Amino acid sequence: MQRRQSKTIKIPFCGLYDSDASHALAQQIPDDSYDTLDHPALSVAFAELYTKMFAEYLKDTCGITISLFFEELDSPQFYDADTDKIYCKISPADIEKLWDILDTDELNRVVKDMLSQDNPLVTFGDNELSKGDWSAPVTEWDLEQLELMLWAILRQHNVEQIDYAVMFEQYQKDICKIVRDYTATQEEMVG
């Protein structure tokens, strides 16, 4: 019996530059530690926590329980035309679970809305589900297609935009802990 491999999925994220996420982190960093921190490493630690937060958010807002495993934080060299992306691993069974509850009419609307905008950041695929890469089995979709499926499911549950500020407020203690733990590690390395 062949075991099906997990897939990479890009999850919705506001990024770490001048965003609710960067503000949530900055509020927890002691002023005297800010300049000495390894910000890229702290950003990865935050992205790992965000992966857990997003899975919990899906459970709370949509009643969907899936497992997401942090894989990578991709930060652009320049933030003028792009933002940070979080990639996770998801099992084929969880992809199929998402597909089973998906309203394909909503997915069509999301695809048309997001891909028909004059958005230079959109660099993939057809905007009609019946054409091109959209006709492949859902477990073979690419990471952007899977992200659009997440957005469609969120919209099915009346979430047009994620209220990141509220999400980060709910996880303030966890954010504080990663900053505190990371700050202590940095101080030990310096001291």
Image (cartoon, grey):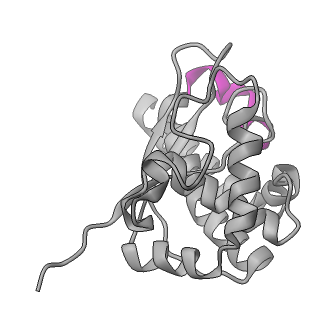
Q: Is residue 103 visible?
A: yes
Picture residue at 57% right of the left edge, 59% below the top: 51
Magenta segment's dominant SS is helix
Q: Quadrant of residue 155?
A: bottom right
183 or 127: nearer the eye? 127
Number of dots carrying numbers: 0
Q: Is residue 87 visible?
A: no
**Residue 107 position in % (x across, y down):** 68, 60
**Residue 55 position in % (x across, y down):** 61, 69
89 or 31: nearer the eye? 89
Q: Which quarter of the rendering shows the C terminus?
A: top left
**Part of the protein shown in magenta:** 24-37
134 or 120: nearer the eye? 134
**Residue 120 position in % (x across, y down):** 65, 20
Q: Is residue 129 magenta?
A: no
Report the residue that reaches farthest toward the front: 130
Picture residue at 86% right of the left edge, 50% below the top: 165
